[in-house]
Image: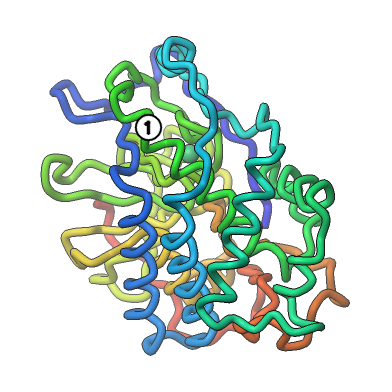
Amino acid sequence: MTVSAVKILQPGEISGMPADDTPLLVVPQNAKLLFEDRARRLEQLAPEVEMPDWLRFCAMLARAQATCVPGVEALPIDENAARESLRHGLPPLSITTWPAGAGWDAARQALIDALVGAGLQAQPGAALARWREASAESSAALARDFLAANEHAVPPEFAPFIGATLQVIWTASAVRLEPLTSVYKGENALCPICGSHPVASAVRTGNRDSHRYLVCSLCASEWYAPRARCTNCDTPKEVSLLGLTRESAVQGECCDDCHGYIKLMVQSRDPQLEVVADDLGTITLDLALAREGYQRTGRNLFFTGGNDTSGDADRDSGNAAGNNGNISSGSDSGRGSDARRNQGH
Ligand SMILES: [Zn+2]
Ligand SMILES: [Zn+2]
């Protein structure tokens, strides 16, 4: 996967922002409940997809995240510094200044224990066993590479474990910034809390009715993004929506300038939608959009993406997924109906 460079919009380009008190930044309320919801949704979606075992493995990961998150140490937060950062559009829990350290390895071990407790095989030869044997230093180095989207440095078989552990640490930390979110007035392309790429975008209901938010792949925070505009480049041209059917709750918002796309999920069409889970459950759409010549710009931390240069990486079924954690949306091998070009929103 190519993770494209994205930039913060310049002054004068902020048209389309809400004039009322619609929240511009929403952090997760409860990390444990968030992971439980995600696990439930993955279990619900599994029978409907072409790779049910992969989704069941992801559900197991999310359950393990829910199990271990209450005991995981959050990142240190200086409230005044965090407020100033948010005010200036800089992420207070930035991935670029993460010290890793003891907190990382404790979280890593807690997730491994939760997975073993849930029945994931850790016998010699299994991916989980290899992950357990990795040293604190080498695993932290892989985690830093993964955060920096330097994905070719990361064995695909470890990606789900690294991504899940990092999500636990950052989600547990983002929850604590809830009292500060109202100072954020920006229009960031990357997460205002941690600086990560979005996984997808969602048009919400309730008190955020019909507003579109980008959803962080790491900390699960959501930040406002005007609709019908490419979130990857600043083209003034209109974007197209492509979906498997005209009524699909998940569509690709595709840009003919940068040829990038990000999924757009319409919650009113499926109230049970969970953005990370539904992204994993709609790989068929990724394959269809790749055939149309669009490149994925959203990032999902349960897999490494794009050009697979790790052909000798784990091809055994050592992990419960029977999947090596690498999904190439550029593959031509996918089946399913072609994406249809739909009317704008
Ligand atoms: Zn984030
Ligand atoms: Zn674009």
Is residue 322 shown left or right of residue 22?
right
**In which quadrant of the rendered image does the N terminus lie?**
bottom right
Image-quadrant location for residue 257:
top right
- Helix, strand or loop under label 1: helix
* Position in image of residue 301 (x %, y %): 58, 57
* Position in image of residue 339 (x %, y %): 43, 73
Is residue 247 shown left or right of residue 136?
left
* Position in image of residue 191 (x %, y %): 47, 35
Taking 44 as reference, is 208 above or below it?
Answer: above
How many numbered discs?
1
Q: How is the image coloured?
A: rainbow
Along the line of sight, the residue nearer the viewer: 326 or 225: 326
Q: Amino acid at mark 1?
A: Arg
Residue at position x 53%, y 45% from top?
169
Along the line of sight, the residue nearer the viewer: 326 or 112: 112
Image-quadrant location for residue 101:
top right
Q: Is residue 295 visible in the rendered structure shown here?
A: no
Residue at position x 37%, y 49% from top?
31
Residue at position x 84%, y 51% from top?
138
Q: Which residue is mark 1?
A: 176
Residue at position x 52%, y 85% from top?
51
**View extreme (right): residue:** 312
Q: Is residue 340 visible in the rendered structure shown here?
A: yes
Taking 210 as reference, is 134 above or below it?
Answer: below
* Position in image of residue 265 (x %, y %): 32, 58
Along the line of sight, the residue nearer the viewer: 165 or 122: 122
Image-quadrant location for residue 22:
top left
